[in-house]
Image: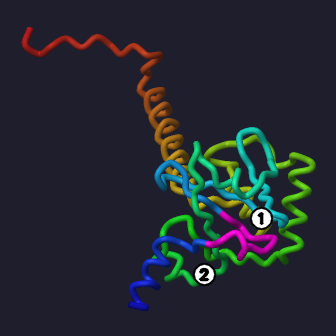
Amino acid sequence: MNKLFAISMLLLGNVIRQEELTPGDHVYTYRRYGLYTHRGIYVGEGSVIHFTRTGVNKTSIDSFRQEDKELHSLHLYAYGRPLLEYWLTRWGTCTALAGNASPEEVVNRARELYEGNGFGEYDLVNNNCEHFATFCRTSVRASAQTALVAVWEDKAKGVKERTTEFLQRINVKGPSLPHLTPYYQ
């Protein structure tokens, strides 16, 4: 039974109750039936600082957890996991990055970004809530959720550039192609 519990915890992530939170914790909650997560930094006194399309915001834990009228469970993001555990765990629940900043440094960094609204423009792939929370803990902007999307975006950009270059080399200009007559005429 203990092995089953350990495996389920690896797959589900670390559910945490509000009374177990400590300032500086990187917390997240699942959204849209578990398709993605929303992340923030617990700063104490029942508040979370997080990054959204409207900028860096400070809200209550319940507001942070709420989607429509439903309150979702809170999860604690884990840092410094061994690579094997990282690869066996549900995507987005932990990282092999070391979260070396002290809890005070994490909270101070989150508060400075909130007060100065200084985390830049929100971008779903390149600058989102996970980038924000990870940055507060590690000084590195990183997002496991969007890393694969970013890789595919770069690959697609490369394919588009190579295709454009190829078409220019064979002198195909603009959207029209030379008229091809059917072979059966």
Tag 1 residue: 42
Mark 2 neighbour density, 10 Å: few (under 14) some (14–19) many (20 or more): some
Residues in magenta, as a range: 16-27
Residue 143: x percent and y percent?
Answer: 63, 59
What amino acid is found at the position of numbered circle 1 in the picture? Answer: Tyr
The quadrant of the picture occupied by the N terminus is bottom left
The quadrant of the picture occupied by the C terminus is top left
Residue 179: x percent and y percent?
Answer: 28, 11
Tag 2 residue: 81
What color scheme is it? rainbow
Residue 29: x percent and y percent?
Answer: 60, 59
Above or below, 98 against 34 in this view is below
Query: What label does residue 62 carry, if any?
Result: none
Is residue 24 inside the magenta stretch?
yes
Residue at (43% x, 82% y) in the render: 7
Residues at marks 1 and 2, CA–CA distance in whole angstroms: 21 Å
Residue at (41% x, 90% y) in the render: 3
Residue at (52% x, 37% y) in the render: 161
What amino acid is found at the position of numbered circle 2 in the picture? Answer: Arg
Left or right position of 42 against 161? right
Residue at (53% x, 77% y) in the render: 86
**Lower sequence index among marks 1 and 2:** 1
- Front disc: 1 or 2: 1
Is residue 164 inside the magenta stretch?
no
Above or below, 76 against 147 in this view is below
Q: Nearer the viewer, residue 141 or 88?
A: 88
